[in-house]
Amino acid sequence: MRILLTNDDGIHAEGLKSLETIARALTDDVWIVAPEYEQSGASRALTLADPIRVRKEGDRKWAVAGTPTDCVMLGVRELIEGVGPDLVLSGVNRGQNIAEDVTLSGTVAGAIEGMALGIPSIALSQSMLAFHDEVVPYWETAEHFGPGIVRRLLEVGWPVDVVMNVNFPSRPPGEVTEVEVTRQGFRDTHIRTFDKRTDLRGRDYYWMGFSGKLSKPEDGTDLKAIYDGKISITPLHIDLTHRESVNKLKGLIGGVPPKN
């Protein structure tokens, strides 16, 4: 099995080392194409206004001055020699990618690009309770459970238009007792925020971030599973159509266009 690895935390991220550990427990045919610099929050951004530089980091390993989407597309279509990958793994992200955050996530976007290219793809993230520099994620949890979960997902399979979003809880391996297949949740509180600051020349600027407030999620959601210390596996797809509204609106504004 040939596996392509990418992430959004950058080529030197600790989580990419954990992802390589997971992949090498499954195969020796591992290729790495990851962003030169952190691309958290990049979602499915594609670099169009600037050239993309590619730097070889080692055997079967490249750093790309672009987004996770750039990385996967270049990896599959240009950088990997011979046959393409059988699997794309994206992560392991430093912090969870759950609820509405999946639409912002570069980690999830890397998996989506793999899916768009016809390759089974999985996003993996290691949850954290706080995102301060001194807080070290439980990378050993992702490394311990990751190979078995990936192997089992490949055994059972999933639809070609779906990516698997796996989140490991912020607990050591010995305290994780359950895996739950979940649906994407939605927080009941807004956690994205910003801090307004002033530089030394008197000009205002803004620093974006997250407040870290906890919500009260429903049972069965990725949020609730992570809060409860479970491994969450959520099948995701990019069809954002709200079908109930489609059916309702067809009877109200379908047909001849309304006149002014």
Image: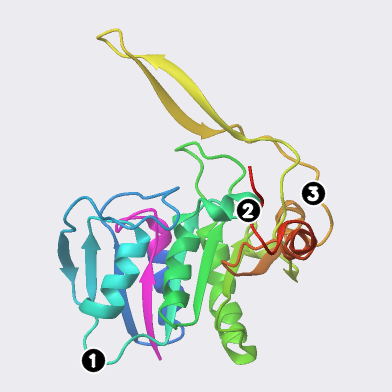
Cα separation between marks 1 and 2: 39 Å
Q: Which mark is residue 217?
A: 3
- The answer to whether residue 9 is magenta is yes
- Is residue 119 placed above or below 70 in the rendered structure? below
Residue 22 located left or right of residue 80: right
Q: Between residue 166 and residue 78, name the one nearer to us.
A: 78
- Is residue 168 placed above or below 74 in the rendered structure? above
Instruction: Give the number of callouts.
Output: 3
Q: Position of residue 180 (x, y in %)?
A: 75, 69
**Tag 2: amino acid:** Ser
Quarter location, residue 148 = bottom right
Magenta part of the chain: 1-16
Neighbourhood count class around disc 2 (C-alpha, 10 Å): few under 14, some 14–19, many 20 upward: many
Q: Position of residue 250 (x, y in %)?
A: 74, 64
- Tell me which label, 1 or 2, sits earlier in the chain: 1
Q: Which mark is residue 82?
A: 1
**Tag 1: amino acid:** Gly
At 31% across and 12% down in the image, what residue appears?
Answer: 203
- Tell me which label, 3 or 2, sits earlier in the chain: 2
Cα separation between marks 1 and 3: 46 Å
At 30% across and 79% down in the image, what residue appears?
Answer: 76
**Quarter of the image that includes the C terminus:** top right
Residue 188 located left or right of residue 18: right
At 21% across and 78% down in the image, what residue appears?
Answer: 78
Q: Which residue is mark 2?
A: 170
**Tag 3: amino acid:** Pro
Neighbourhood count class around disc 1 (C-alpha, 10 Å): few under 14, some 14–19, many 20 upward: few
